[in-house]
Image (spheres, helix red, strand yellow):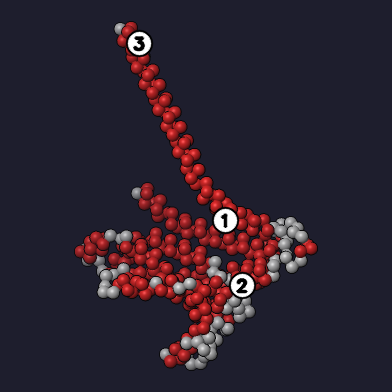
């Protein structure tokens, strides 16, 4: 009996020793894997720190200093939030904010509506669908600088083709200076941006449409659901993640708009089409005022960060709910 107890004790001790060894080996293995992960990710982290994080930190730092390259004798004194207070009292700043939000709202809404219509159309099987898909993507494939220059010539009130076409259609009765009139300039820029970027929106939404199982539509048809019911009960709910991602990309891109406005109007006439990015670029590069320019860049960054957080929360909520279900 005593020998039996001793052998049981030995077995238990051996088992505990094996468990402890396995635990130590598991911890060592996980530690080694973590170190390997950090080693593999370190080049990417280093690139992000050098090319992304450092410029952001340096811009924030400059926004708290007065630095005008036109007056190098003044040095670079620390001024705290003075730059932010000065731009907040500037009517030009608030006008640029208004133009940026106006441009973002109208361009994203029109691109969403037209992009969804195009995606629904080219998602349906018909003869020549591949050719139509390629043709639809042409505006997006043209570089922004080239397409903007093209539209600048087309909008010209003397040599452009827009005025003659609209007059022949009876929409207008006299030639309009589209890019030189404050009443039409921003609308013309939004039109060009919608024409150029709607295919991108359509492409993202088409990818979302193609992962919806066709069996759902067939079952709905069998149950007697009409086209509108299938769209609102199946297509729209299942397309929501793709819609939100497309809206996130386009809203952020529209809010940072610079190139289209710079080429078409240069922010004019007056400041009637100047966006936040254009205003910051003007202060930085034309006036050489790096303090105020950096403050404007930081304000733009904060707006973009808030928009990103808003959309990420919108995208995250349904995913979490689905996981809980």
**SS category of the residue bearing label 1:** helix
Q: Is residue 85 visible?
A: no
Tell which residue pokes out farthest to the left in this image: 222
Q: Nearer the viewer, mark 1 or mark 3?
A: 1
160 left or right, relative to 73: left
Mark number, residue 52: 1
Mark number, residue 95: 2
Q: Who comes first in sequence, dot 1 or dot 3?
A: 3
Q: Is residue 140 above or below residue 294?
A: below
**SS category of the residue bearing label 2:** helix
Mark 2 surroundings within 10 Å by alpha-carbon count, few (fewer than 14), some (14 through 19), many (20 or more) = some
Q: Residue 184: image x %, image y %?
A: 54, 82
Rounded to the nearest angstrom, the CA distance separating label 2 from label 1 is: 29 Å
The residue shown at (30%, 72%) is: 129
Q: Residue 52: image x %, image y %?
A: 57, 56
Tell which residue pokes out farthest to the right in this image: 73
């Amino acid at each position: 009996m005593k020998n039996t107890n001793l052998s049981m004790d030995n077995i238990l001790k051996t088992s505990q020793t094996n468990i402890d060894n396995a635990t130590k080996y598991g911890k060592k293995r996980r530690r080694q894997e973590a170190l390997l992960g950090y080693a593999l990710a370190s080049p990417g982290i280093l690139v992000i720190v050098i090319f992304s994080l450092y410029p952001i930190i340096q811009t924030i730092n400059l926004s708290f200093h007065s630095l005008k390259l036109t007056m190098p004798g003044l040095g670079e004194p620390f001024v705290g939030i003075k730059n932010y207070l000065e731009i907040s009292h500037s009517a030009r700043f608030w006008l640029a904010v208004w133009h940026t939000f106006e441009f973002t709202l109208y361009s994203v809404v029109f691109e969403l509506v037209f992009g969804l219509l195009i995606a629904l159309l080219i998602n349906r099987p018909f003869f020549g669908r591949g050719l139509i898909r390629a043709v639809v993507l042409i505006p997006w494939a043209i570089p922004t600088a080239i397409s903007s220059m093209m539209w600048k010539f087309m909008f010209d009130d003397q040599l452009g083709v827009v005025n003659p076409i609209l007059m022949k259609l009876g929409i207008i009765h006299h030639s309009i200076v589209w890019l030189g009139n404050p009443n039409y300039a921003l609308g013309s820029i939004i039109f060009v941006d919608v024409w150029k970027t709607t295919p991108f929106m359509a492409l993202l939404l088409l990818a979302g449409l193609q992962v919806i199982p066709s069996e759902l539509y067939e079952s709905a048809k069998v149950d007697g659901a009409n086209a509108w019911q299938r769209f609102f009960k199946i297509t729209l709910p299942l397309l929501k993640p793709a819609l939100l991602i497309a809206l996130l990309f386009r809203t952020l891109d529209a809010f940072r708009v610079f190139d289209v406005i710079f080429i078409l109007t240069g922010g004019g006439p007056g400041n009637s089409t100047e966006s936040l990015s254009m205003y910051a670029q003007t202060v930085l590069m034309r006036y050489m005022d790096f303090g105020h320019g950096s403050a404007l860049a930081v304000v733009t960054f904060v707006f973009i960060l808030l928009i990103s957080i808003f959309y990420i929360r919108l995208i995250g909520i349904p995913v979490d709910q689905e996981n809980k279900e």
